[in-house]
Image (cartoon, rainbow, N blue to C red):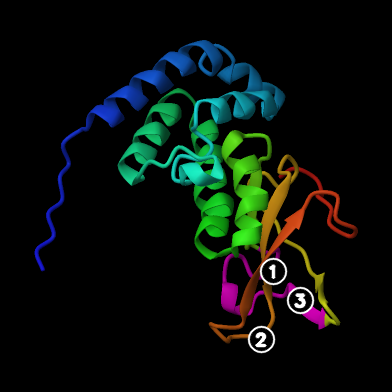
Amino acid sequence: METVTSFDVSENQKMIAQMVRDFGAREIKPFSMEWDEAQHFPVDLFRKMGGLGLMGVLVPEEYGGSGFGYHEYVTALVEISKMDGSIGLSVAAHNSLCTGHILQHANEEQKLKYLPKLASGEWIGAWGLTEPNTGSDAGNMRTVAIKDGDYYVINGAKNFITHGKSGDVAVVIARTGQVGDSHGMTAFIIEKGTPGFAAGKKE
């Protein structure tokens, strides 16, 4: 089977690039230095980007997303990052890690519950893998999830998590098998405000 890949810029990509440039000139570039110096995370900006479809670029329209592909997604990230690299990283983490994980692996009930809120920018998503002692070595993670009746009890800590403090929901990876077992990890969707789930200091 022959695979043909085109790197020509599509009309959709041109439209998205111009839209992001226009938006960024008004809403990002004038405030970028101020946010950085104040260590401020502009939550309202992400709500606005959600209104433009930038918080759910890859999410199908049936779940409230834009329904575009990776060419359009990368185009949006490039244009955002030209104006503010940290905002570009945040948009990527939200779309690729949290939202993408739910889109690819959640059940239908979970998709219907979380994807519309994430795609609209109403909620900001986080993804928790990295740990204080083991870094991003998933096979040796120390966060564990123990089955307790119909629920799981999760014990552990994560660090360097993008949107760890500002996120409304997180996909958290925990060990449910033996240390070193490459299939012994499970992803859990945890909402902000869940008892025992708290964010520490910003690092």
What type is the residue that disc 1 sits on?
Asn
In the picture, measured across the screen, residue 133 lies left or right of residue 7, that is: right
The residue depicted at 60 percent of the width and 55 percent of the height is 111
In the picture, measured across the screen, residue 32 lies left or right of residue 188, that is: left
Mark 2 or mark 1, earlier in chain: 1
Say whether residue 137 is magenta.
Answer: yes
- For the C terminus, which image quadrant? top right
Residue lying at the far left of the rendered structure: 2
Identify the magenta region.
131-147
- Can you identify the residue that label 2 sits on? 177
* Callout in the foreground (1, 3): 3
35 in relation to 119, above or below:
above
Q: Residue 8 location, x and y as percent?
A: 16, 36
- Can you identify the residue that label 1 sits on? 133
Secondary structure under tag 1 reads: loop
Asked if one can make out residue 128 in the rendered structure from this viewpoint, the answer is no
Q: What number is the disc on residue 42?
A: none
Residue lying at the far front of the rendered structure: 62
- Can you identify the residue that label 3 sits on? 145
Give the distance between the C-alpha atoms of the residues marked 3 and 2, in whole angstroms.
9 Å
The residue depicted at 61 percent of the width and 42 percent of the height is 116
